[in-house]
Image: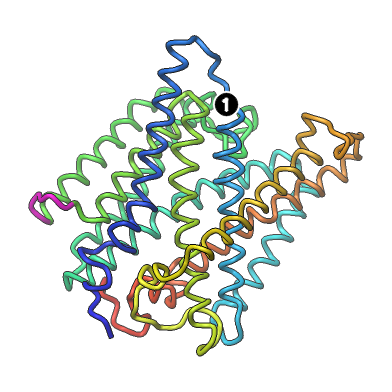
Amino acid sequence: MQDLETVAPQGFIFSRSGDFVAFSLPVIAAALVVGGRALWSWTSGAAADVPEWAYFLCVVLCDAGHVASTFFLAHAASGRGSPVSPLLAASGAAAAACVVSLAFFAAESALWLCMGYLSVAHYALQQWQFVDAACRRHAAGRGAGLFSFCKAFVVPAVACPVLIWHTDPARGFDWFFREEDLPVVVPEALFPVIITVWGASFFVFILCVFATEPPSRHIPTPVLLVLAAYVTCGLGFTLPDRTAGLFFLTVPHAIPSYFRNFLGLRNHWHLKGGLSGGFSVHAQSAAARISRGASQQVWLFLAVCVAFAVADEFLWEALVWREWSTPVIEHENPSPEAMHVAVGLLFVPQALHIVWEALFWTPALNPSVLALYGLPASAQDPMA
């Protein structure tokens, strides 16, 4: 068995370059695009609405595309003998039935609200999952869970900006939400309290980091991920510009999801010949396996995800949005029942994505995912 610190030097989740591509690069790219567009809008006086290119990049390629990557992962985990296969099948059927039933029997706004809050919870859970993985990798190399406290700070990093957004629903964030349908609007008088709690939590986090390890040139990965959560959620949920919200929340969320789901699929392809389906205990890091001859598989993976995303957007336009008409799409007035069923069916992929990634990537529910990070599931938990 390889030495874990050799597999992931200095506690990186995948590798130094892999972590940069998955986590740092999306945040940097979002900041550059949003900053550049803000400067252009300020100097040119252009309208602040979301441009079509930003919508296509964030909503179609990132949001809808990374949903498709989950289906690859479900396929990789559905082999014979996989411990999570029955759970994924049962939860997927239940999620699909709930979404369609809610769309048909309840008010349409109820479905949009449920999917909106589920998406926010999914965003927070993914942040926690990556911080948890980083803590485990760091603990494996250092022999102790020094930065396990980082996981607790994901909650205020996400929750406080969400509450700030609820004090003024007219802000830019609008994942599945319709401002007039928000069930709870936090009194604006609580805004200073929320800001104080948010800032205090960040200050306590920094104190904990310095108390745990003296400052050095290398910032531990768990710390970087929590800092990224404070930055992306703070800007994405609270800035009044919708384009900023799309970039700061969608891009840093989707790219890591693409990355880890491809690693899961790649791992399945490597183990398919000699082992049963699903993820088995394997000490070698997935990042090392993906680096050998994976370019063609990466492009195939991305091409299928993009094709799904474009088809998904086409169906939303043809059946729900109905904002443009072509010889291919001829708009007719459907019955309310047909519209409800269409919305419910189109929400099924998103619901499956949320449920399956929660079940598959949480070690407490599926310990075998630790093998992807070079942490054998049968070994003693280094975080214990």
Residue 292's x, y, as percent? Answer: 41, 71
* 47 falls in the magenta region: no
Tell me if residue 29 comes above or below residue 352 in the rendering.
above
Q: Residue at x 81, y 40 (%)?
A: 318
Residue 228's x, y, as percent? Answer: 33, 44
Number of marks: 1
Say what amino acid the circle numbered 1 marks: Val
Given the current orientation, which residue lies at the most extreme left position?
214
Q: Residue at x 74, y 42 (%)?
A: 316
Magenta range? 213-218
Tell me if residue 138 comes above or below residue 241 in the rendering.
below
Residue 105's x, y, as percent? Answer: 80, 49
Tell me if residue 276 comes above or below residue 236 in the rendering.
below
Tell me the quarter of the image containing the C terminus.
Answer: bottom left
Tell me if residue 301 comes above or below residue 4 in the rendering.
above
Q: Residue at x 13, y 56 (%)?
A: 212
Q: Which residue is mark 1?
A: 50
Q: Main secondary structure of the magenta part?
A: loop
Residue 330's x, y, as percent? Answer: 89, 36
* 216 falls in the magenta region: yes
Which element is circle 1 on? loop
